Amino acid sequence: MWKHKIFVTIGDQEPIWTPPPSDTMRVDVDASVWNQNHVACGKVTRNAEGDWIMGFKKKLGYLGSTAAEILAIKNGLELSKTLGFFEIQLPKDSLDAINLLRSCSPHHPLRGEISEVRGIIYDHWEARIIYLPRTSIR
């Protein structure tokens, strides 16, 4: 089991899509905010060979960008776990969302969602969230 499941590597860049280790799924999720905070998220799951396994898109309602990123992570993790993908890598380009998952105030307005995501991450499976700067993801 990975010792640290939510971590940040600032400055590392991924010039091209990098496959996960064998027997691990790579789950790329992202959120999009447009026109008066309408929010949607999407996910693409690929295996170590780069084969597309599944994807989804989902409307999330009206939110700010950080809340949207947290919910995109949550949706990606929930679906991956439901489908039986018990070893995943989830690269994310939102440092704000990752830092909130690592540590947040008990009074933070997203505390409930953050607690749910943490619960999913640490619930007896191999889920690792990695920070990749936006300019590095292709």
Image (cartoon, rainbow, N blue to C red):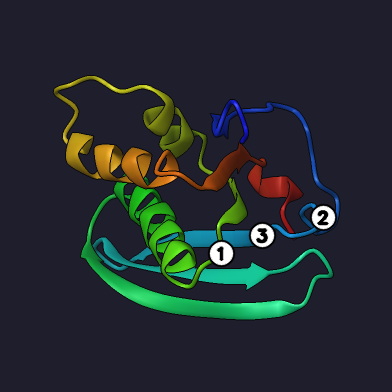
| Closer to us: 63 or 3 | 3
Residue visible at 42% across and 38% down in the picture: 122
Tell me which amino acid carries mark 2.
Thr
Query: How many C-alpha atoms fall within 10 Å of the one at disc 2: few (<14), some, or many (≥20)?
Result: few
What whole-number distance in Å separates the C-alpha atoms at marks 1 and 3? 10 Å
Q: Is residue 43 left or right of residue 130?
A: left
- Work out whether mark 1 precedes mark 2 in sequence or the reverse, and give the earlier one: 2
Kindly report which numbered mark, 1 or 3, lies closer to the viewer in this rendering: 1
Label 3 secondary element: strand
Identify the residue position indicated by label 2 in the image.
18
Residue 85, disc: 1
Q: Quadrant of residue 57?
A: bottom left
Where does label 3 land, which residue?
26
In the rendered image of this protein, does residue 2 appear above or below residue 24? Answer: above
At a point 43% along the width and 60% down the height, the residue shown is 31
Q: Residue at x 21, y 34 (%)?
A: 111
- Measured as percent of width and height from the top left, residue 105 is found at 23, 19
Amino acid of disc 3: Arg
Within the image, what quadrant is residue 110 found in?
top left
Disc 1 marks which amino acid? Phe
In the foreground, 127 or 114:
127
